[in-house]
Amino acid sequence: MKLIKNGRVIDPKSQFDAIADILIDGQKIIAIGQDLVREGAEIIDATDKIVAPGLIDIHVHFREPGQTHKEDIHTGSLAAAHGGFTTVVMMANTNPTVSTVETLTEVLSSAARESIHVKSVATITDKLDGQTLTNFEALLDAGAVGFSDDGIPFTDAGQVRRAMQKAAAFDTVLALHEEDPQLTGVLGINDGAIAHQCGVTGAPTVSEYSMVARDAMLALDTKARVHFQHLSAGESVDVIRFAKSLGAQVTAEVTPQHFSITEDAILTHGTNAKLNPPLRRSSDIEKLIVGLQDGTIDVIATDHAPHTHAEKDQEITKAPSGMTGLETSLSLGLTHLVAPGHLSLMSLLEKMTSNPAQVLHLDAGYLAEDGPADLVIFDADAVREVANDFASKSSNSPFVCAQLQGVIAYTICDGEIVYQA
């Protein structure tokens, strides 16, 4: 039994925000209130700290099976716990891809050994071929929480429409990576002045928002639940806002890196700032922030994508895209959204807890009596320098040495302390 005392308890789902105590017994919260006392309970002093639902990330790459030199489910879970996350959802573009019940079962069996909740989507198409739909019913029965071909955009509009029709029939979510390969040059760098300085043609914003527009209208037509991953272009926000106004059941996410830094980071951080979709311009960040403010963008997700030093230490055209993100996510939100006054702390946490849970219908992301004992305790005002000592196997981040706000004190999952500073 644990008793968390004197913290500022914030629960976005109920909009509760007050100094309170939380009593935990086993895997459940059994009381939230003032001046709670329980003899024999382990006391956790949360004075001057925030107590919130454990963070949820619905877009991570743990590289298992097939690429465990970059990350595996265990080290990814450690990174998540260090970042305050108690639930994560793995993408399916592994080797082999999570396209069959057999592979999904193997992945979930490994995940079940971890101290946080690790879930997985399955691929929309077999081996990411863009054509052959997987067995949605069997994969859902085996534990998939949704479907995504993340990393491989759909070029066949008819096939994505059929996938949406199938998803609607099973009331499940399709999560889509939107970058039209026929409109891009070198992936991972915005097509603009910085790319041209590097001597390449990059990926223009139209490669993203044109596909977002197509698929938002297909979602409206099919009545499917469609989630747009890692938005980077300001125009994509406009399109999704319009689709929502028409009644489309669409949701969207943005990564902390896309609202924190611009394409200029390529010049200072090299390939550690090479991402798919790429970092964009300050004008795009302004629109992403407005999308967060008005609810067009529902979720903040990391797209945690670890790579080794050897893989990243190549010229810009050869290095893989992606960065490790779980251990800096909350701090980037506090630093670039809350501190400047763009979002309230309640709103930031909503996009990292209750909203992602709602997208995938997870019983998580809230604090309530008889609810799950998944919590994060953090100092929202403390400033830290990001050290190159990640719990992840990889340290490919443009934020190493950055001064960021927010320090995790405890991560608690199923009533157990899984990380303590």
Image: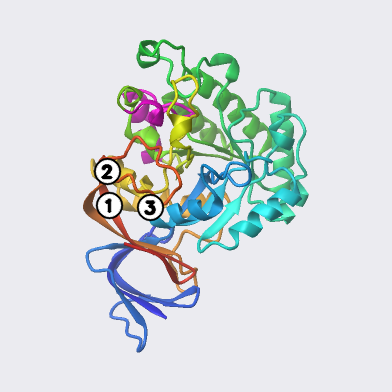
Where does the magenta region start and end?
Answer: 269-294
| Residue 148 picture quarter | top right
> How far across and how far down the image is residue 104, in percent?
69, 51
Closer to the chain start, of discs 3 and 2, is 2
Q: What residue do we see at 76% from left, 40% from top? A: 134
Q: Which mark is residue 406?
A: 1
**Vertically, is 28 above or below 154?**
below
| Chain-order first, disc 1 or disc 3 | 3
**Which of 22 and 390 lies nearest the eye of the viewer?**
390
For the residues labelled 2 and 1, say whether their Cβ atoms are less than 8 Å apart.
Answer: yes
Which residue in the structure is indicated by mark 3? 349
Q: Secondary structure at mark 3?
A: helix
Disc 2 target residue: 335
Q: Is residue 285 magenta?
A: yes
Disc 1 versus disc 3: distance between alpha carbons?
Answer: 13 Å
Residue 7 drawn above or below residue 63: below
